[in-house]
Amino acid sequence: MKTTVIVGAIAAALALPAAAQKKYDPGASDSEIKIGNTNPYSGPASAYGQIGKAIAAYFKMVNDQGGINGRKVNFVSYDDGYSPPKTVEMARKLVEQDQVLFLFQTLGTPSNTAIHKYMNNMKVPQLNVATGASKWNDPKNFKWTMGWQPNYHTEGMIYAKHILQTKPNAKIGILYQNDDYGKDYLKGMEDGLGDKARSMIVSKVSYEVSDPTVDSQIVQLQASGADVFFNITTPKFAAQAIRKAYDIGWKPVQYLNNVSISVGSVLTPAGLDKSVGLITAAYLKEPTDARWASDKGLEPFREFMKKYMPDANIADNFNIYGYTVGGTLAAALKQCGDDLTRENVMRQSANLKSLRLDTLLPGILITTTPSDYAPLEAVQLQRFNGKQWELFGDVMQSH
Amino acid sequence: MKKTWILWAILIIVACALPFMVSNYRTFQFTLVLVYAIALLGLNILTGYNGQISLGHGAFYALGAYCAAMLMDQAGAPYWLTVPAAGAACLVAGFLFGLPALRLEGLYLALATFALGVAMPQLLKFHAVEKWTGGVQGITVLKPSPPAFLAEAGIKLNPDQWLYFFTLAITAVMFILGWNLVRGRVGRALVAVRDQHIAAEAMGINNALYKSLAFGVSAMFTGVAGALGAIAVQFVAPDSFNIFLSIVFLVGIVVGGLASIPGALYGALFIQFVPNIADEISKAAPWAIFGVFMIAFVYLMPTGVAGAMRLLTTRRKAP
């Protein structure tokens, strides 16, 4: 312990003269930017761990290409097993012991909630967290925390907007998972419908993650006479719901949340023929989609997958997700220049002006301001044609 | 005899000096070790001394944690008051759960407690109680700051150090309680019930009472640990208390040493630090590495770390 202190003191003394013009907080130096992360590499949610691996590979690529403003990125990622107490422990380890400049893409709503106050007390950025809850966009109370993906609430509002435009007299039936994720979507839909929510939503039914099936809920929704179905479910249940609705001959207009848009793990088990006509929102390009087969923008991503993640499956959405969020951070850090203080990292992250990344759908840009911490707010609707998703309409904003 | 006193003195000095020698983060980790030690001691009273296997002690830990968090969050209770409250609640809950569980022996009891452990996270999410438990969102707890009288006395502690000492004091109390319990008449009765319940009954021991009592006391220890854990981590959510926690507790007492008081401390050190070491060795398969550690421990020290220590000291004394 003592040696570390001495080494640290020497390092600090050596760094001082050089830092006359450049400004550094712990974790940043002339040669390195140290970033912390937690991901569930083990445990029930370990599928998400792929995101952490993709981000690590992304920064390996960045380093091979010379780093960011000449500094290598040191991405330190720990396993938290999707357990909030473990996240607290790991976050403290990263901040207090490893002395990272900031945390990035810590994954999971409960895990991030557990460290929310801590990070803000310590004044260490908790950047681009990997969850779609809407509470991460609260710069007034939590200046040091920022989300990234379009949040569930926003997405719900966009579906509401589309329903109002195309089917103003719709009778809406909603199936949602009974937790904060499901309720965020539900609230988005209700807020989007505004005064009409009361009259248009004819039935709301929920299910628990522990339920074996959602069959009875679908029957219940059909019985309510709904002609629009908003399906707020995670992949396994999404597949069941789509299949059951088709099998009992219920033919509403179906909106499916972005969480379950995977063709491979949702629509194929549900039956591709039974999924025709589903509407959902997207913001990332689907790498396996024939439409992007010769897309120039996806070429660097394909190269990256070949070179840095040769064993990973390109159809796995988490890879392009990790690659894109990595690109967002790289842009913000580039903007920081030589002022690598926590304050400035947060300032630049909250000052991204129409950032365009090639893996995002055309027309979708990343914009943040000091009063709006939601980097991605636009999505485009797409409809399933039996083989693949087909984009339609314009890029939509929630407001 | 003299030697033991010197050992005790050294242990106390080290325990008190620890937070001043290491970083705040390490202090926090050692606070968690103490918390786990209390929980393991509780489970050890039930499993080690009384021979009842519980695969659901995570549920009592959760109950203690939620008691503390809800009392602070909803009722504005001071943090130190929540610890005995959580202990009392878990004592009652454990005793009541122990009553029907009495009819179950060995593996069947293990299954019943397993059911409790599996059900707990979902019960906490149940929407009728969501108003109090915060549902999946959980409850955020404020970190206690050192009391004013310490600052007035000229002792400056940061919140992490204060929490460590607070936990240390409670750990000491709980260990003395546990030690007194198992070395006396009650302890002998517990062991007798474990080893030969028919003989124990013939000697006039009320098997049923002692079994449910063991369950209640064990749950109380674990509940106290849960409350301290909630205060240390400053957050409770159903996902924090999945079945895995219960299994880890069981691993802790077996590795530390069954039916051994210091074994709880060794077990706590194991479950706190070995997963971190495993994660540092391999990101791809941390639990495989953890498994290797576990097999190595069980193979090399079949009676737990405590048993190995005992062996070491008696061997030295022998010649």
Image: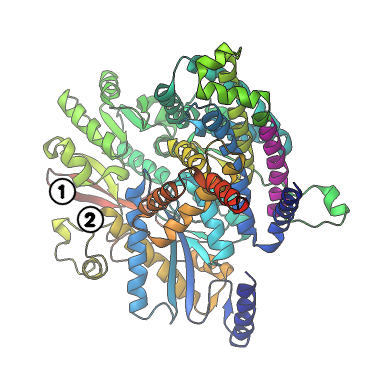
Task: Measuring from the top left, give residue B45's x and y in whole percent.
Answer: 58, 31
Question: Disc 2: which chain?
Answer: A
Q: Is residue A2 left or right of residue B97?
A: right
Q: Nearer the viewer, residue B26 or B209?
A: B209
Q: Which residue is mark 1?
A: A388
Residue B176 painted magenta: yes
Q: Mainly helix, strand or loop, the magenta region?
A: helix
Q: CA distance from mark 2 to mark 1?
A: 10 Å
Q: SS for tag 2?
A: loop
Q: Amino acid at mark 2?
A: Glu
Mark 2 or 1, nearer chain start? 2
Image quarter of residue A274:
top left
Q: Residues within 10 Å of mark 2 (few under 14, many from 20)?
A: many
Residue A291 in the image: above or below residue A71: above
Which of these two is toward me, A57 or B177?
B177
Task: Provide residue A222's location: percent of width, then percent of height.
Answer: 25, 22
The amino acid marked with disc number 1 is Gln
> Looking at the image, is A79 positioned above or below residue A306?
above
Contact between labelled residues 1 and 2, with CB atoms less than 8 Å apart: yes
Q: What range of the chain is rendered magenta? A: B159-180
Question: What residue did someone put label 2 on?
Answer: A286
Find the residue positioned furthest to the right. B153
* Disc 1 secondary structure class: loop
Q: Residue at x 53, y 48 (%)?
A: B308
Which residue is drawn at the image coordinates 53% and 44% (left, top)? Answer: B307
